[in-house]
Image (tube, grey):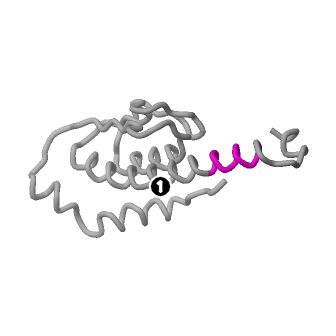
Amino acid sequence: MIYITDEEIDKFIKDDIPYWDITTELLNIKSSATIAISNRKKECILCGTEEAIRIANKLNLQINFVKPSGNVLKSEETFFEASGDAKDIHKAWRICLNILEYNNCYSYYNIVIFFYIKEYSSNSSLDKSF
């Protein structure tokens, strides 16, 4: 298991928004909003929601709903929802999506490889351990 430190979370935020968020400033967004993230592709293993929660918390968002990492998601199933200031929602949206898409892609391929090895392995100890 990989643990992402608070310093790394802060770096993700700073890398995406080094000084200020020009998009929300130019659009002059001044309202509250809610973000809902769902799985729009095929079934996958959820990974990275704990980091998305930490990012949302650092940006003063309220978590409304979240499914923990390790859950199997069906296509178009919502797994994360947060509310707060629209400027903060916009900041969190890009960072969280990058983390979630990257992690979910790798968790999906890891589980596919695992089941492939389990099915075609002649090593019986592999079957006993799972």
Quadrant of the snapshot with the C terminus: top right
Can you give x and y, in whole percent of width and height, for residue 48 in the image?
51, 48
Can you give x and y, in whole percent of width and height, for residue 13 in the image?
37, 61
**Left or right: 92 with respect to 111?**
left
Q: Quadrant of residue 22?
A: bottom left
Residue at 34% across, 42% down: 61
Task: Please name whichever residue, 29 or 67, is drawn nearer the observer in this view of the structure.
Answer: 67
The local secondary structure at tag 1 comes to helix
**Left or right: 68 with respect to 82?**
right
Can you give x and y, in whole percent of width and height, for residue 116 in the image?
70, 46
The residue to which callout 1 is attached is: 102
Q: Quadrant of residue 33?
A: top left
Magenta-drawn segment: 110-118
79 is higher (above) or lower (below) than 52: above
**Left or right: 7 with respect to 85?**
right
Judge the density around disc 1: few (<14), some (14-19), many (≥20) Cα neighbours within 10 Å: few
103 is higher (above) or lower (below) than 41: below
Residue at 37% across, 34% down: 81
Residue at 38% across, 36% down: 38
Query: Would residue 116 be counted in the magenta stretch?
Result: yes
- Please count the marks in the image: 1
Residue at 33% across, 36% down: 36
Q: Is the magenta stretch mostly helix, strand or loop?
A: helix
Q: Which amino acid lies under the numbered mark 1 shown in the image of this protein?
A: Tyr
Query: Would residue 103 be counted in the magenta stretch?
Result: no
Can you give x and y, in whole percent of width and height, for residue 52 in the image?
45, 47
